[in-house]
């Protein structure tokens, strides 16, 4: 009789964080860093496309390629600073960065002295830092803030697709335990005792057999990085790119981006495993095993920040709509 078991996928063995594993000189070149380059390049090309279509021009000033380079550079610097600071001060539980803040941008392991790069970035910190960078640029160059933020908001989601694929290539930020047939066994995931009843129930359901003599088993996880790449990246970009020509007022696309990303990410957080050292910020059933989704009322750190994004985006949209309505009524 034909059987479809086992109902899970092994993480591809040919995937390594490094582009050229085993080659000392080239071992520092990683997929994640390359994906960052693709992400920034994609955002730049989409922003320039809008600039050349005249979307950023004002009656008294035409946007140039130099403006695009400068604007996106300020945004990228702000994003990287915010992402790194937020990651080390909010998500790191050791407290070392609060005691030794100069280590935030120290790219070497303090124990082994090996080059590690700036491992650890926070999206929400990057969002705040990038926004501040763009605001400062617009004020310094006397450009219409919300018009430029709209253009950037319509450009950056597609770049996130590459960033999340980079997370997948790194085998990090994986999801919670699942029995869906596309669940993946990530090598770095926590293993669980085979003799636990719930573990055995999942193994039986997906046709998994533990290795002989093994007391621990690696269970398949949701590929939440790919969920994020699809919804926070491609789907959100398609929505915003379509709306950009139909926006009722400047700032509308920026508000839609903030709401849309917050909403997609909030939902996907139910499939993505929270940082085990942080656990749930709000828990209603007392569950401390973050690899399992036992209640929709267990809220992660990321979901709290996403809620703030949704509320902030709605408040911004309402405020800008009121200001636009008043301006229209006054005839100015």
Image: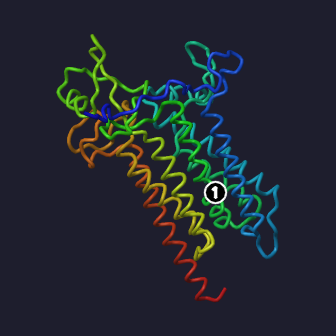
Residue toward you, 169 or 273: 169
x%, y% of residue 228? 48, 47
Quarter of the view holding residue 279: top left
Under tag 1, what secondary structure? loop
Q: Is residue 189 above or below residue 287?
A: above
Residue toward you, 245 or 329: 245
Q: Residues within 10 Å of mark 1 (few under 14, many from 20)?
A: many
Residue toward you, 242 or 6: 6
Quarter of the view holding residue 36: top right
Quarter of the view holding residue 118: top right
The quarter of the image holding the C terminus is bottom right
Q: Is residue 317 visible?
A: yes
Q: Residue drawn at (47%, 66%), measured in percent from left and top?
A: 315
Q: Residue drawn at (56%, 47%), measured in percent from left and top?
A: 161
x%, y% of residue 240? 56, 63
Residue toward you, 82 or 166: 166
Identify residue for label 1: 155
Colour pattern of the rendering: rainbow
x%, y% of residue 213? 27, 10
Residue lying farthest to the left in this orientation: 197
């Amino acid at each position: 009789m034909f059987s479809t078991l086992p109902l899970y996928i092994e993480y591809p063995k040919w995937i390594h964080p490094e582009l050229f594993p085993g080659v000392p000189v080239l071992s520092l070149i990683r997929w994640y860093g390359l994906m960052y380059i693709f992400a920034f390049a994609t955002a730049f090309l989409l922003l320039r496309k809008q600039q050349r279509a005249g979307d950023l021009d004002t009656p008294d000033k035409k946007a140039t390629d130099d403006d695009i380079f400068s604007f996106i550079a300020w945004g990228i610097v702000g994003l990287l600073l915010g992402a790194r600071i937020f990651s080390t001060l909010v998500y790191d539980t050791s407290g070392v960065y609060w005691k030794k803040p100069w280590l935030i941008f120290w790219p070497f392991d303090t124990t082994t002295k090996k080059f590690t790069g700036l491992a650890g970035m926070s999206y929400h910190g990057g969002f705040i830092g990038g926004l501040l960078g763009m605001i400062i640029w617009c004020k310094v160059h006397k450009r219409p803030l919300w018009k430029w933020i709209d253009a950037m908001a319509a450009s950056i989601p597609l770049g996130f697709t590459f960033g999340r694929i980079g997370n997948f290539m790194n085998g990090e930020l994986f999801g919670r335990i699942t029995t869906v047939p596309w669940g993946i066994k990530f090598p770095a995931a926590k293993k669980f005792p085979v003799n636990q009843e719930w573990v055995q129930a999942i193994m039986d359901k997906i046709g998994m057999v533990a290795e002989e003599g093994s007391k621990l088993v690696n269970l398949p996880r949701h590929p939440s990085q790919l969920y994020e790449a699809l919804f926070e990246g491609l789907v959100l970009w398609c929505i915003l790119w379509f709306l950009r020509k139909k926006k009722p007022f400047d700032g509308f696309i920026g508000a839609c981006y903030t709401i849309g990303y917050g909403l997609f990410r909030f939902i996907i957080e139910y499939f993505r495993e929270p940082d085990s050292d942080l656990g749930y910020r709000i828990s209603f059933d007392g569950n401390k095993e973050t690899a399992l989704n036992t209640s929709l009322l267990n809220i992660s750190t990321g979901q709290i920040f996403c809620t703030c994004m949704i509320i902030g985006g709605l408040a911004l949209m309402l405020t800008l709509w009121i200001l636009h309505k008043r301006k229209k009524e006054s005839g100015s």
